[in-house]
Image (tube, grey):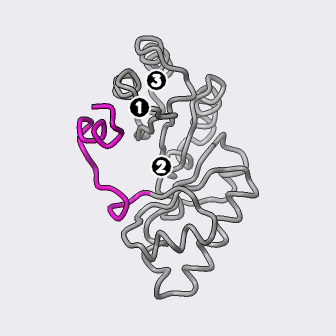
Amino acid sequence: RQLAQWRTAGASLPCISVNLSPRQLLDPLLLTQIDEAITEHGLDYDSLELEITEQCMVDRSEQVGEQLALLQQRGVRVAIDAFGTGYSSFGQLLWQPLNKIKLDRTFLEKVDSDERAVSVMTAMFEMAKALGLELIAEGVETEQQARFLRERGCELGQGFGLARPQAPEAIAALLDCA
């Protein structure tokens, strides 16, 4: 609904990302709810990106894989949120239908002081590129971190150093469509 409102107001936004809990992902009504919301608001499926946690991929992975495949068949994009902490498995990247990896903030916070963090981040960028996955770095707090990402070709970032969470009205004003 919010994306449709912003677009009606004149914003040119390609998609909106929505966090999905493990319970929601396994809900048998999820696809019906998404179908209804897309139709009701006159959107295309590719204007929706669902963010799931690594835990979603590990628990009941066959069922999750089937659900993700059905979502992608509709055109919904899927991202792994906070990748690289806890339950990571590079094997999941090979066979789960995904479009994007959101690299956890813990890696970026150490790039100014730990050469190993730089190496891990650089390897993650290369891996995502080789797998045809978009990569977004979470936790961009400083200009140094933003520069680090730009220098390595990471075009997408998220964090308080770029923008703080805001109400839809404030975002509309930033998009000049209020």
Q: Nearer the viewer, mark 1 or mark 3?
A: 1
Rendered location of residue 106, percent (x, y): 44, 71
29 or 45, which is in the foreground?
45
Q: Which residues are magenta?
A: 158-178
Q: Nearer the viewer, mark 1 or mark 2?
A: 1
Element under label 1? loop
Q: What separation in Å lies between label 1 and label 3 (alpha carbons)?
A: 27 Å
**Quadrant position of the C terminus in the picture:** top left
Q: Name the residue tied to disc 1.
A: 11
Q: Name the residue tied to disc 3.
A: 30
Element under label 2? strand
The residue that appears at 38% across and 21% down in the rendered structure is 8
154 or 74, which is in the foreground?
154
The residue that appears at 51% across and 36% down in the rendered structure is 49
Q: What separation in Å lies between label 3 and label 2 (alpha carbons)?
A: 17 Å
Vertical placement of residue 114 versus 26, above or below? below
Element under label 3? helix
Q: Is residue 107 magenta?
A: no
The residue that appears at 25% across and 46% down in the rendered structure is 166
* Quadrant of residue 140 within the rendered picture: bottom left
The amino acid beneath tag 2 is Thr
The residue that appears at 47% across and 57% down in the rendered structure is 82
Q: What separation in Å lies between label 1 and label 2 (alpha carbons)?
A: 29 Å
Q: Which mark is residue 53?
A: 2
Rendered location of residue 21, percent (x, y): 40, 40
Query: In the rendered structure, which disc, 1 or 3, sits on the residue that comes first in sequence?
Result: 1
For the residues labelled 1 and 2, say whether their Cβ atoms are less than 8 Å apart. no
Vertical placement of residue 106 versus 35, above or below? below
Name, please, the residue furthest toward the right. 130
